[in-house]
């Protein structure tokens, strides 16, 4: 029964934040939801919108616009909550839209350019060019790394 | 926040919403219980009655706040339930659908009022319910039925019997099998309960609890057919604690040889209403609070007591604390019951369904002695029933298909339970055809769900299966239950802080894994609001709640204080601490926590209620914040944070500057 888990390697879920397309390994994605009401958590990091219940667990919601240093935007019908799993953690990511599932061959992913500036550059582990479209492959563990965030977002 | 926030009417509305939440939560729970009764004449009356009361209350209170759509809808739902209660209609799948949709619409209508948005239209749902009621009976018939049902003393006591049947080859040769026996018994009266068990010599015996008036001739003829009959204890009012007599064993001996639960002699088992345990738990909570008050009083008189006497008092106080803790844990342990309670219904379900579908199925039960909280047992019954039914109707193939695939003609379903630390893991696995990924995807697409390309992983398949509105068979397939089946299973598991996962291999089988906490952290809490936010505060940590006029708060340097029991109590406004807008209320509620010099008042807008909550941990470091101990769900799926007043108080004592951080309005 374990062979079902190895399926889906090389398959990614594409989402957009502020006009840029990003990719997450589909194995890291637990499921996607429409964004329903989020409970604000007082004194949480600025890029955390709050918590929701997802499949019985209390899951923090990270606003990727805020995480990448963009302005927050109002949610619309295309906005999604992508619930991702990293090690034992479950975290929700708010993205502008998420629709496509694609396969990216491993050799199509290049290491990021030095020149890839901006906040989101820190969280990118590679760049893929598929059909003339640039896709930034996300390093999930870095997005969720709180220690690094502290030094970035909360200057003391 | 609306402009009428400070009016008495808004207070009234707060109460209304709190009360609605309670009723709607009850409705949800009961609906799940009702779902298994589709197509049966013997619907659990208790469930119907309770559901009816909830709708009736919702109708009444909605009328008082002039929320007409809610009042109307509750009225129609109540109507339909009245028909079902009288037994004038059998609950159909359409009926359950209408009830589910109606209840959901009711939640939406009330939710819209709370959010101040336009209510959704109830017309379609009401139309369906009216249609269901209209199909049943004409008004005259209903009126006469009503007259009959309200006759006083309509239910005289019927004697109870315990009938035991041990099938044998000889009896079967005479045409007497368990089905024949069941038919015979049900023609004479009502079968209240049926349990298969293994006798001491390894044979299978079927025990039936029967309510019937039997004459000596019937009894004699039954005895002749191998049915043993004995008079059972008379029925006792359900509000009473039931002492189980030796004639009615509380726990059927497990079939798998796990004797931990069977070794208890039945005569030593007392069955207690869960509500009574809850009462006990509440009493312990009261005791904890009284103990805190006593400590407070003692601290004040300490100086006037000789040192020797004081030491004795302290020792006693410590002993009481320890005993209180033991008592609390003891009560939690009493709540643990073997999962065999769920399992013992399954052989019947499997047998009936296997016969109906023409399949051959063997059921294997493992780990029936595994103990979990009674609260969990009651809520897991239906989800597990559903998964077992699914395994038979979707998982196990027909005999021909199995033989063609080179499998044994008989399919096997294994139901197992085991504990690992604080987690109980239940598995329902079958050796059937596995989940057909392509069929699932096609169905999901047809239902308008978002579907990944390529071969989905098991967890994606599970989310599709659990999506509301998903069902891989026709509505007419009774066995699979309703389209919302898996969605209901999942939400039931989630409500209990559990998780559901799926493993499947095409052609070889499917396994559903449920992981649940052995016992739930359940606690009494006060529900408080600050602006539009809601928080829960564990009652045990609150010494007292007082009401204070904001205009009468004393400004002492940078602190706010209020007179309290002859001293000044520092007040911190929760809203300021959490960066919320300042209250618009004239009077606020204050939780008093800590004692003496460490005492502190935490001001909230209002306390809207008191209730038992299920505490869920907040594990992730991104949202682990001091002063918040967890989260709970008040029944609407929305996260409500649980405050830890002791930590808040300590934090403020250590870092009083925190009091003022947010006063300038740091909220976002």
Image (cartoon, coloured by chain):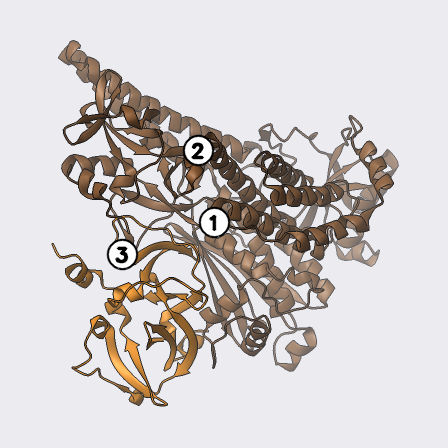
Chain colours: A orange, B brown
User: Residue under circle 2?
Assistant: B610
Circle nearer the N terminus (2, 3): 2
User: Residue under circle 1?
Assistant: B370
Mark 3 surroundings: few (<14), some (14-19) or many (≥20) residues within 10 A: many
Q: What kind of element bears circle 2? A: strand
Mark 1 surroundings: few (<14), some (14-19) or many (≥20) residues within 10 A: many
Relative image position of residue B240 (x, y in whole percent): 60, 27
User: Residue under circle 3?
Assistant: B622
Q: Quadrant of residue B351?
A: bottom right
Tell me the distance, in whole angstroms, between the alpha carbons under discs 2 and 3: 29 Å
Which one is in front in this view, the residue at disc 2 or the one at disc 1?
2
Q: Residue furthest left?
A: A156
Residue B254 in sight in this render: no
Q: Residue at x 70, y 61 (%)?
A: B478
Q: Are marks 2 and 1 on the same chain?
A: yes
* Image quadrant containing the C terminus of chain A: bottom left
Circle nearer the N terminus (2, 1): 1
Q: Residue at x 64, y 70 (%)?
A: B410
Mark 2 surroundings: few (<14), some (14-19) or many (≥20) residues within 10 A: some
Relative image position of residue B219 (x, y in whole percent): 83, 38
Residue B300 in sight in this render: yes
Eyeballing the image, is B548 above or below B91? above
């Amino acid at each position: 029964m374990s062979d079902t888990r190895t399926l889906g390697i090389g398959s990614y879920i594409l989402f957009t934040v502020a006009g840029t397309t990003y990719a997450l390994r589909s194995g890291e994605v637990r499921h996607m939801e429409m964004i329903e009401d989020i409970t604000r958590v007082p004194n949480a990091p600025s890029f955390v919108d709050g918590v929701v219940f997802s499949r019985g667990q209390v899951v923090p919601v990270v606003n990727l616009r805020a995480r990448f240093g963009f302005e927050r935007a109002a949610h619309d019908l295309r906005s999604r909550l992508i619930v991702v799993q990293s090690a034992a953690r479950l975290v929700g990511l708010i993205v502008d839209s998420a629709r496509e599932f694609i396969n990216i061959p491993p050799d199509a992913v290049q290491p990021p350019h030095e020149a890839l500036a901006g906040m989101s550059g820190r969280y990118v582990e590679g760049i893929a060019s598929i059909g003339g479209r640039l896709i930034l492959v996300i390093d999930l563990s870095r997005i969720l790394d709180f220690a690094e965030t502290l030094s970035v977002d909360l200057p003391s | 926040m609306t402009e009428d926030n400070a009016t008495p009417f808004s207070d009234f509305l707060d109460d209304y919403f709190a009360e609605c939440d309670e009723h709607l939560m009850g409705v949800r729970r009961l609906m799940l219980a009702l779902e298994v009764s589709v197509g049966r004449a013997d619907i659990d009356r208790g469930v119907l009655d309770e559901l009816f009361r909830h709708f009736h209350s919702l109708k009444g209170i909605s009328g008082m706040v002039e929320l007409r759509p809610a009042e109307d809808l509750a009225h129609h739902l109540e109507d339909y339930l009245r028909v079902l209660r009288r037994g004038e209609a059998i609950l159909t799948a359409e009926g359950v659908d209408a009830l589910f949709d109606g209840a959901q619409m009711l939640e939406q209508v009330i939710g819209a009022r709370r959010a101040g948005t336009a209510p959704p239209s109830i017309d379609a749902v009401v139309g369906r319910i009216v249609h269901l009621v209209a199909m049943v009976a004409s008004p005259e018939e209903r009126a006469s039925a009503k007259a009959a049902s309200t006759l006083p003393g309509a239910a005289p006591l019927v004697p109870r019997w315990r009938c035991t049947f041990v099938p044998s080859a000889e009896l079967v040769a005479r045409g007497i099998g368990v089905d024949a026996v069941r038919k015979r018994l049900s023609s004479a009266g009502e079968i209240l309960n049926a349990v298969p068990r293994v006798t001491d010599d390894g044979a299978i015996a079927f025990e039936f609890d029967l309510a019937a008036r039997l004459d000596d001739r019937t009894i004699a003829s039954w005895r002749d057919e191998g049915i043993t009959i004995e008079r059972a204890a008379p029925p006792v009012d359900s509000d009473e604690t039931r002492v189980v007599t030796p004639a009615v064993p509380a726990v059927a001996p497990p079939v798998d040889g796990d004797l931990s639960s069977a070794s208890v002699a039945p005569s030593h088992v007392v069955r207690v209403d869960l509500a009574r345990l809850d009462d006990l738990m509440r009493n312990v909570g009261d005791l904890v609070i009284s103990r805190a008050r006593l400590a407070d009083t003692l601290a004040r008189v300490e100086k006037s007591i000789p040192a020797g006497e004081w030491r004795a008092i302290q020792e006693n106080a410590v002993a009481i604390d320890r005993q209180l803790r033991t008592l609390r844990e003891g009560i939690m342990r009493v709540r643990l019951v073997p999962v065999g309670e769920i399992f013992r219904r399954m052989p019947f379900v499997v047998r009936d369904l296997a016969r109906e579908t023409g399949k051959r199925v063997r059921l294997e039960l493992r780990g029936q002695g595994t103990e979990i909280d009674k609260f969990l047992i009651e809520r897991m019954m239906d989800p597990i029933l559903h998964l077992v039914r699914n395994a038979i109707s979707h998982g196990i193939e027909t005999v021909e298909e199995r033989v063609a695939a080179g499998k044994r003609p008989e399919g096997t379903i294994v139901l197992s339970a085991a504990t690992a630390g604080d987690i109980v893991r239940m598995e329902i696995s079958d050796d059937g055809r596995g989940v057909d990924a392509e069929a699932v995807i096609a169905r999901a697409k047809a239902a308008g769900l978002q579907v990944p390309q390529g071969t989905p992983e098991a967890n994606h398949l599970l989310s599709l299966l659990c999506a509301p509105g998903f069902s891989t068979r026709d509505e007419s397939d009774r066995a699979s239950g309703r389209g919302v089946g898996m969605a209901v299973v999942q939400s039931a598991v989630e409500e209990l802080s559990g998780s559901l996962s799926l493993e499947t291999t095409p052609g070889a089988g499917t396994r559903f894994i449920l992981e649940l906490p052995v016992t739930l952290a359940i606690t009494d809490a006060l529900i408080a609001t600050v602006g539009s936010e809601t928080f829960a505060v564990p009652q045990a940590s609150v010494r007292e709640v007082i009401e204070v006029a904001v205009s009468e708060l004393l400004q002492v340097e940078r602190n706010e204080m209020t007179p309290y029991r002859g001293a000044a109590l520092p007040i911190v406004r929760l809203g300021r601490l959490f960066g919320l807008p300042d209250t618009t209320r004239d009077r606020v509620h204050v939780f008093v926590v800590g004692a003496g010099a460490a005492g502190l008042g935490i001001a909230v807008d209002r306390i809207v209620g008191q209730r038992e909550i299920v505490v869920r941990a907040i594990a992730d470091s991104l949202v682990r914040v001091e002063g918040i101990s967890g989260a709970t769900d008040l029944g609407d799926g929305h996260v409500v944070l649980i405050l830890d007043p002791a930590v808040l108080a300590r934090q403020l004592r250590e870092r009083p500057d925190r009091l003022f951080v947010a006063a300038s309005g740091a909220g976002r």
